[in-house]
Amino acid sequence: MHTVWKGSISFGLVNIPVKLHAATEDKDIKLRQLHKKCKTPIRYKKTCETCNEEVSPEDIIMAYEYSPDKFIELDKEEMEQLRKEQEAKAVDIINFVKLEEIDPIYFDRSYYLSPGDGGGKAYALLRSSLKDSGKIGLAKIMIRSKEKLAVIRPYNDTLIMETLHYPDEVRAIEEVPNIPEKIELSQKELDTAKLLINQLTEEFEPESYTDDYRTALMELIQEKLTSEKGVEVKQADNVVDLMKALEESIKKTKPKKSSPRKATERKKA
């Protein structure tokens, strides 16, 4: 499992070397956009509207727009130094709370925590302590140049860390449009709704739920691959200007385009 972060967790005088691994993955089916006319994959380029030219990564700087069309430039080296200073810090558990005290709206992403070299006993100590106390640890961590609030809790035989949104990242309820105010409901309506809820209540078993749309889309793709030939990029019958073609090839230095079928097979592999 790929390691996305290495560091340590500390609570009190206990320090635990740990590694962070993404606990979830995106299973969406990736589709490419083709030019309807020639079936060539569409590519996106970063361009400058003023200079009317394509911009390379080396020519791009970072800036903050403090008012419309007014920017303050941020030096990459200063930003990198700031990031390193924050990443160098251990993940300090600030305090301990109950899981049910945190509304699900605050949860962002989940990561598995594994012990680093020599950290097995301290890891087991934290895991057992959290299980016995029924509490979870609230901490801060720097991931991908952003400081995140996070909780650390036991999950089966491992520890899991879940990043949280800060309160100012959660939009105010007052911004939600068309929320009905107090509406009179009869007792019969409430009783009937509760009866329906009780009849549909089951124990949560995540394995029994599947992405029906993704399954149907993959079946459609497989059906088309079986019954039709994959779309290939059309090549010109002849080259009028050989030198011009060579010069364009040198500029673009594109790898040979493969068919969507081959691209699909590579992703499966």
Image: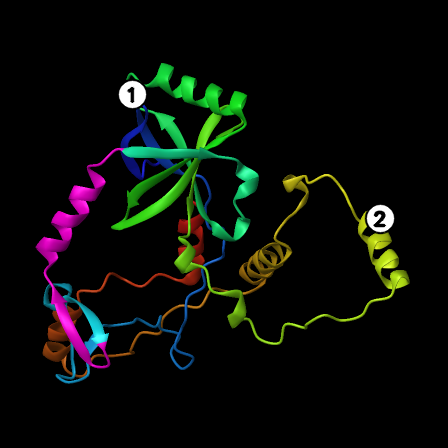
Can residue 172 be seen here? The reply is: yes
The quarter of the picture where the C terminus appears is top left
Figure quadrant of residue 31: bottom left
Number of marks present in the image shown: 2
Which amino acid, mark 1? Leu
The correct choice, above or below, for 117 with respect to 86 in the image is above
The boundaries of the magenta stretch are: 67-90
Q: Which residue is drawn at 15% across and 49% down?
A: 82
Looking at the rendered structure, which numbered label has been put on residue 199? 2
In the rendered structure, are the residues bearing label 2 and label 1 in contact, judged by CB atoms less than 8 Å apart? no
Label 2, secondary structure: give it: helix
Q: Residue at x 33, y 41 (%)?
A: 140
Q: In the image, is residue 61 part of the stretch drawn in magenta?
A: no
Q: Nearer the viewer, residue 245 or 54?
A: 54
The correct choice, above or below, for 26 with respect to 40 in the image is above
The x, y position of residue 213, in whole percent, is 61, 59
Left or right of residue 90: residue 56:
left
Q: Nearer the viewer, residue 109 or 136?
A: 136
Q: Residue at x 38, y 36 (%)?
A: 21
Left or right of residue 144: residue 259:
right
The quarter of the picture where the N terminus appears is top left
Which amino acid, mark 2? Gln
Q: Residue at label 1?
A: 13
Q: In the image, is residue 88 part of the stretch drawn in magenta?
A: yes
Left or right of residue 82: residue 194:
right
